[in-house]
Image (cartoon, rainbow, N blue to C red):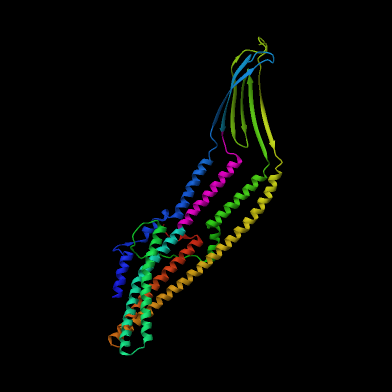
Amino acid sequence: MKRSVLLFISIILFGIQSFGLDFQTVIDQLNETFDVKAALLKVEGLEKEIAALSNPEDFNFTLNPTVKVTSQETGAFGEEIDLSGTTSFKIPIGLSAPEREKLENTIDSLVIAKESVITAREKMYFKLYSLYQSVWLLQEEEPVLAMELRAAENYSEIMDQRFTSGAVSLVSLAAAEATLQERGDEYSRNILRQRLAWFELMFNADLNMIPESLEKKSLEMTDIPKPPELTDWVEDNHPLVKAERIKLNQMKKSIEEIKKTDLDISIKPFVNYGGHSASLSYTFSDPELTAAYSFPVYTYGEIPAGSGSSSSTWNTGVTVNISLGSNRSDLFNADVEELSLRSAEAGLSYLIESLSLELRSSYQQLIRNQGVYDQAKRNLERSLDNKSIIETKMGLGQTSEFELLEAESIVSRTEWKIESARINTELSWLKVLEDAVWFSKAGLDF
């Protein structure tokens, strides 16, 4: 009766369906999970930033009209009024050194960001697989707990009958009832844990579904090279190592730029004629072409009046501007940056050693879990043998129904432990793939 009530409550609380949810439905949501989506958005943002940084500044056209009023010290105001104008047109034709450096750094950041997307997808795959299997194990454990509860109920009834007849003590009866209560509590906790685990799975997978029974999912675990063979691979391919190497290259380029001679050159040809002036200047350090033109519009009056005797002239020439800095302060900064570079190189070596140690640790955990899995399968053989013995005794009337129920529950629990050990082995295998950056070579398609 108690078991029937508990089963009814579990159906109401957990809403078990006649159809199941498969892992593929969960993993199809991979790009919708928070971490992966954030990584993808960062890539998109950097791509747009690179597009903006790749183009020089906009063209710029300027018009400056001018009114100039000239008066003699003792004369009337505005005896000569000049109207003129100046136009200029700036054409950026390249990126300056700081702009090029920023563009290159952003491109490097994009490379790191794309690696981060791969890493985020792998980590989320691992997390979703772990959560999915947690829910599945809890669901598979529910009937096992129900069998254990039924065996405890049967034993409690037997002990109650024996206590009534005086065959056992009150202490033995209390122990049987305590076992029954404990197994009932374990069953109730399982129902609650199923519900919580389901909500956690739905939250991380960005799904909104009512609880369903999950379909069994297992991985085909391919062979992985041993850690000594993976060390060089990790050193060259791990995203963290790649990111640190990119940062080191950026630091080296920055030091080279700082040590360069601080030289700035610009050239400006010009021509002047009859109040008109035209020039074209080009700056090498900040590639930009600037055309300028000044022109008279109208002159009213003349000082001195009627002078007009000046000869018309024109001139042309070239102006070259050379600026050379001592670069002393930059050299001091370069010394500081070189110290930072040496520190970063030491940090990279430490990172590689740490990753290698972590890989060896996860590989050993995989071996341990494989051993537990094999032992669980051997335990099942013994449990089945024991059950066969109990069934034989049951047929001969040499044992009670409780012994058979207990033997069946032990077999079910052992089978459940095999599945638990299998899943732990698969999770440790995935952890090795993650630490070794071996997902793409393991044949996992996600």
Res 160 → quadrant: bottom left
Residue 91 percent coordinates (x, y): 56, 32
In this rendering, the answer to whether 82 lies above or below 57 is above
User: Which image quarter holds the C terminus?
Assistant: bottom left
Q: Residue furthest top?
A: 306
Residue 28 percent coordinates (x, y): 38, 56
113 magenta-colored: yes
In this rendering, the answer to whether 409 lies above or below 307 is below
User: Does the image show residue 218?
Assistant: no
In percent of the image, x 70 and y 43: which residue is there? 327
Total numbered labels: 0
| Residue 418 appears left or right of 433 | left
Res 273 → quadrant: top right
In percent of the image, x 41 and y 69: which residue is there? 422
User: Which image quarter holds the N terminus?
Assistant: bottom left
Residue 52 percent coordinates (x, y): 51, 41
Q: Residue furthest bottom?
A: 166
Instruction: State the predominant SS element of the stretch in magenta.
Output: helix
What is the magenta range?
A: 92-121
Res 234 → quadrant: bottom right
Nearer to us in this view, 34 or 320: 34
User: Does the image show residue 232?
Assistant: yes
332 magenta-colored: no
| Residue 276 appears left or right of 26 | right
